[in-house]
Amino acid sequence: MLTALAAFSSPSSHERQETKIKPVLSAFTISDRMAEDPMSCDCFVSLPPGSLDDHVIFGKNSDRPRDEVQEVVHYLPTSHPPGSILECTYIQIPQVEQTHAVILSKPAWMWGAEMGANDQGVCIGNEAVWTREAVAPEEALLGMDLVRLGLERGDSARAALTVITGLLEQHGQGGQCREDPEPFCYHNTFLLVDRNEAWILETAGRLWAAQKISEGVTNISNQLTIGTDISAEHPELRSVAQAQGWWDGVGEFNFSQVFSPETQPVRMELAKKRYKGGAELLQQHDGSMTAEVMMSILRDKPSGICMDSGGFCTTGSMVSILPRNTNLPCIHFFTATPDPSRSIFKPYIFSKDDTPVLSVVSPYFGPDDPVRKYPRFQGQVDRRHDLYKAHQEALNTMKTDPDKGVAIYEILRDLESQCLSEISAMLSGEIPGDELGNLFFDCVDTELKFYQ
């Protein structure tokens, strides 16, 4: 077992720890909400030479309704009988015969996921976007369903792109995107990453364009960003744009200019600030990006990337290390709790001996779930998992007894820092990685004990 966990295994050792991480104090003394923060998610990637080591680094903040619970769930690789049918959030589609193991950070009420990874070294995150194509209120595949489907069926970023675009063209995207009867629907952009490359995929209804990223740092937010550098596209993308009068068929075809709405929704206008802030933070660390630096970007409040505004907040966060060396494992860090500036990232590594981590899995309500009943969303259920409940109680302590709350959190951040150091040592060959399979379980268990 990692010494970082052993160092925190008894109350007496907790008391002996020196609080080293002073910057986190500001997380509890500044205002919880920032005026006019953009309501959006952010995805980031660094590919060598943008990364300090020969690793691809992926990161995402999931900004969702503030009371929505995000769970972290692991599904094993599975063989499915021919002709099987898959129940997604709203619709059924044909199942494939084999699906990969996946680890997902997902809103507890839906089938799909905001972000996740598979055992093939692929990571995907999505963002909401609005375009000139009308958003269909009819139930279809959610963007979050497409994230999960891409991970379950794709053994590379390019293969996952093919999965998602094929399903998008066949089944479309649509349906309610939050657990509430008040309509809230959108199209989606995606960042798909593996050990070698990244793809930005932007959609407008069933249409889409994609751009391959081979090196350096890049980010996406709630807006179209693909211009003329289009690596792949829907076969009817340009003909539809021309038929609608959005493009003359002669001039340069710039996807974001052609398909962005003439009047941007307020949330998309505000997201430009976050997109710019995220790009600036990436550029500051271009050539020196690490998982720890990516976590600091996701915790950044001045830029609005760590978001807490109105009815929305960052409800879950993820950072992944994808070594170019295929002999080394990929490591995926999840908070499983809201607000990364008040949470810690816990590492997960795919293993044959995974121990289920039920304390970050929400209760299951079966056919009685208000999502499954018609009309949908006419009631509420308590989806909080054990870690979420304990974390919320800790946040209350931080507000009522700031000294005690900060002391607890600094010790946990010290644990996170030591885990990062030892994982770095393992990836560089300094220490063996034999006992890492249950690391996520052990870290969650340790965090729960601290809160108790």
Image (tube, rainbow, N blue to C red):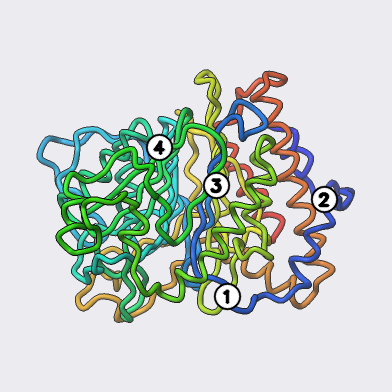
* Percent position of residue 130, x then y: 35, 66
Disc 3 element? strand
* Percent position of residue 3, x then y: 75, 33
Amino acid type assigned to the residue bearing label 1 in the image: Ser
Answer few, some or many: residues within 10 Å of disc 2's Cα (few below 14, many 20 plus, some between 14 and 19): some
Amino acid type assigned to the residue bearing label 3 in the image: Gly
- Does residue 151 sit above or below 394 in this rendering? above
Disc 1 element? strand
Please tell me the numbered disc located at residue 212: 4
Instruction: Calculate the distance from the C-alpha at mark 3 to the C-alpha at mark 2.
Output: 30 Å
The residue where tag 2 is placed is 14
At a point 42% along the width and 58% down the height, the residue shown is 127
Answer few, some or many: residues within 10 Å of disc 4's Cα (few below 14, many 20 plus, some between 14 and 19): some
Instruction: Calculate the distance from the C-alpha at mark 2 to the C-alpha at mark 1.
Output: 34 Å
The residue where tag 3 is placed is 59
The residue where tag 1 is placed is 309
Taking the image as shown, residue 127 lies to the left or right of residue 187, namely right
Q: Is residue 355 visible?
A: yes
Amino acid type assigned to the residue bearing label 4 in the image: Lys
Instruction: Calculate the distance from the C-alpha at mark 3 to the C-alpha at mark 1.
Output: 21 Å
Q: Earlier in the sequence, mark 3 or mark 1?
A: 3
Judged by depth in the image, the label closer to the viewer, 4 or 3, is 4
- Does residue 196 sit above or below 278 in this rendering? above
Instruction: Calculate the distance from the C-alpha at mark 4 to the C-alpha at mark 1.
Output: 33 Å
Answer few, some or many: residues within 10 Å of disc 3's Cα (few below 14, many 20 plus, some between 14 and 19): many
At a point 14% along the width and 45% down the height, the residue shown is 94
